[in-house]
Image (tube, helix red, strand yellow):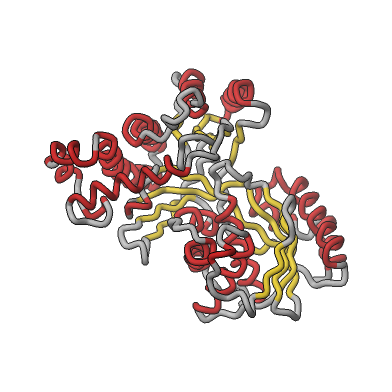
Amino acid sequence: MKLTDMKNALLAGEFDARLSEVYGADAVSAQQARYAKALDEFVALYGADRDVSLFSVSGRSELSGNHTDHNYGCVVAAAIDLDIIAVASANNESIIRVKSEGFDEDVVDIATYNTPDPTKFASSASIIAGMSAQLVQNGYATGGFDAYTTSAVLKGSGISSSAAFEDMIGNILNYLYNEGKIDNVEIAKMSQKAENQFFGKPCGLMDQVACAHGGIVAIDFADPTAPVIRGIPFDITAAGYALCIVNTGGNHADLTDDYASVPAEMKAVAAHFGKKVLRELDCAEVIAEIPALRSKLGDRAILRALHFFTENERVKAQTEALLSGNLDTFLSHVCASGRSSFCYLQNVYTTKAVDEQGLSLALCLAEQVLCDKKAAWRVHGGGFAGTIQAFVPMEHVEEFRAVMDGAFGAGACLPLHIRRIGACKIA
């Protein structure tokens, strides 16, 4: 559809049913305005005489499985109603141009940039090139396009802005050049490989799958080359809860070693037994070998390994609880996951800056506000700084938000909803 016709149809309400399906009826007006503004930005960049399409990819929240995926464990994650949107139009070149709001335009020639280039690691251009190369490797068509994107998936918030961007490039190529026939999970797998090979980051698959799949999803990484992915048709909003993410701020600059130490110590325990990852062992084997492990690796590595085993079992219990509609059991395991992360995984604050404990403070405040209510709270994502997660009854959301915003600044608390639809074409 021509751009002017697209904007007129959007503002005339012709896409209201689709917007309601993706965002909910209450959000249609705001999303109309958001997409209309994105269309205007596209015109300013690339001109009005273009056939365009509108796309959306959700962010994600990890619901259970804190630091389990890198040792081939299990996770539960969900798409959320903060997303990245794009206006895109195919061109007759081998060039992909992407202008993301707040960032410089990326211009990538996919005819020449089609193999990993270490000098371009950690750039958005590397993701664009990597996604195109992955489509080609998997037997799909690719081609040039121009796109403007804007994102509500805040960087550094633990809700996977990078995975959403990767999935978005695949989503656009899927519909512009492959008639939308590529399954979203396959797009997610290509996104992971693009990030591993072209971006230079050895990430797992949880973020990409959760953003692309939509709804709540359980993932078992026992075989990381063929993870078992299971959709969970449970509606937390309909059950009367908001999923609140609290951004405590904090300095992420010196946390690389902290993050790396978690999988490294877990894998060091596995290596003591001649194994690659903890999933190849059981808890009893580790407990029986504690004296030798204490001498060789220290206590923290053992504690983190024990967290892995109990967290993996929690994920399985939470999956079954949601499948059977048992929200009380699910919530009790959320709190248990938080306690284990704080006490045993030890990823709530860094020992390099013990005076900076925003996550500890947020968890303490969450307990004070929610302890006498049927609710739950835990560290969210990688930890050490950043965000906590809470499942808050709707009638207590404003009370919870007021306390968190009062401590960490206006807008620190984000009440979210789980989004049923992941990567998609809007119009």
Q: Residue at x 39, y 48 (%)?
A: 323
* Residue 253 vs residue 366, the one in the foreground: 253
Q: Residue at x 24, y 34 (%)?
A: 299
42 left or right of 205 in image: right
* Residue 280 vs residue 181, the one in the foreground: 280
Position of 424 relative to 234 (above/below): below
Q: Position of residue 176 (x, y in %)?
A: 67, 74
The answer to whether one can see residue 146 in this image is yes
Position of 258 relative to 183 (above/below): above
333 left or right of 241 in image: left
Q: Residue furthest front?
A: 119
Q: Position of residue 49 (x, y in %)?
A: 87, 72
Q: Quadrant of residue 290?
A: top left
Q: Position of residue 72 (x, y in %)?
A: 33, 55
State the quadrant of the C terminus.
bottom right
Q: Residue at x 56, y 61 (%)?
A: 121
62 left or right of 3 in image: left
* Residue 125 vs residue 140, the one in the foreground: 125
Q: Quadrant of residue 228?
A: bottom left
Numbered disc total: 0
State the quadrant of the N terminus.
bottom right
Position of 79 relative to 357 (above/below): below
The answer to whether one can see residue 53 in this image is no
Q: Position of residue 73 (x, y in %)?
A: 33, 51
240 left or right of 295 in image: right
Position of 27 relative to 208 (above/below): above
